[in-house]
Amino acid sequence: MRDNLPVSDPAVVAATPALGDMWVKLRHYGQADSSYQAAERRALDAGEDRAALLAAIKRVSLCLAIGQRARARRMIDEIEARPVAIDPVMKAVIAVIRFRMAARDASDAEVVKLAGEIRQSQGMEPALLWAPSFPTDATVAANTDARKFGLTDAFPNRTSEIGGIQWIDVGFWIRPDGRTAEMEVLRRSKTAPWSEQMLAQIGGRRYASSSQMASETTAAAINGVYRVERITRRSTYDTPTGSLIRRRVTDEGFEILALTDTGIALK
């Protein structure tokens, strides 16, 4: 791409930190940080402030991923002081990083408000083209199949089993090519043992690359679109074996509410 496209082309800018992304996936975080730094220096030498800022933001994301939150805050403050940070496109990308920092300790109302602000700065989200199956619970699936044929539950609920509401707030990027990246659990209930499986499901999704994402004037052309979903495990009420008291128990499936789009739940 460097040989055949201008250095300012969105495809070149987006690919600048690709080597660092590879090291992150391999869990070589020190090498990833060095790669991002090298990409930032090359972009600065070429006079491409946008690409340099994107590589610097990748370093902030890496700090968040490995739990170095104080360092991430210092770095984003320094990045925001750069002249290129006043660019509306760059401001939108920085706003996502600020959201990721704040979401962990924010209330429900604050998360919804912040997610709405991100939605307004990004415009329309790309359409979902394909997604892997959602995580399944073998016990719940067996009971569901048994009930379809009028049989008793294969694994009946016991009096000691009480299922609370299980939910997670997940944030992830939809890259310009329609692939997902940097999936993370922003907030969660006390128990959500299926969260890692859900992150893997999101990682396998494929979205459309829209005309908006191909425009140089949008944040989508630089880093993609950031999406926040609230995923809740379905539950029902049942009277367990050996009890007369109905109580909440986990059921099959999930409810997904996208906080950064129209707010319509996807089943």
Image (spheres, rainbow, N blue to C red):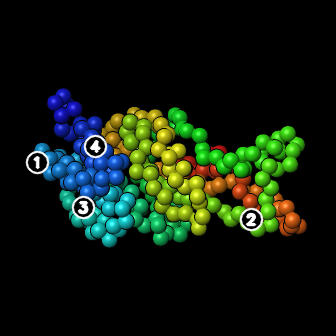
Left or right of 267? Residue 156 is right
Left or right of 151? Residue 202 is left
Mark 3 nearby-residue class (10 Å; few <14, some 14–19, many ≥20)? some
**Nearest to viewer (mark 2 / mark 4):** 2
Residue 235 position by quadrant: bottom right
Left or right of 99? Residue 232 is right
Residue located beneath label 4 in the image: 18
Q: Earlier in the sequence, mark 4 or mark 3?
A: 4
Q: Earlier in the sequence, mark 1 or mark 4?
A: 4
Q: Is residue 1 above or below residue 134?
A: above
- Give the alpha-carbon distance from disc 4 to disc 3, as whole Å: 20 Å
Q: Is residue 210 above or below residue 185?
A: above
The tag on residue 79 is 3
Residue 57 visible in rendering: no
Give the secondary structure at mark 1.
Answer: helix
Q: Earlier in the sequence, mark 3 or mark 1?
A: 1
- Give the alpha-carbon distance from disc 2 to disc 3, as whole Å: 50 Å
Residue 96 position by quadrant: bottom left
Q: Name the kind of residue labelled 4 in the image.
A: Ala
Q: Name the kind of residue labelled 3 in the image.
A: Ile
Q: Name the kind of residue labelled 2 in the image.
A: Glu
**Nearest to viewer (mark 4 / mark 3):** 4
The tag on residue 161 is 2
Look at 26% across and 57% down and name the residue there: 30
Look at 30% across and 53% down and name the residue there: 28
The tag on residue 45 is 1
Q: Name the kind of residue labelled 1 in the image.
A: Asp
Residue 152: x %, y % from top left: 86, 49
- Give the alpha-carbon distance from disc 2 to disc 4, as whole Å: 47 Å
The tag on residue 147 is none
Q: Earlier in the sequence, mark 2 or mark 4?
A: 4
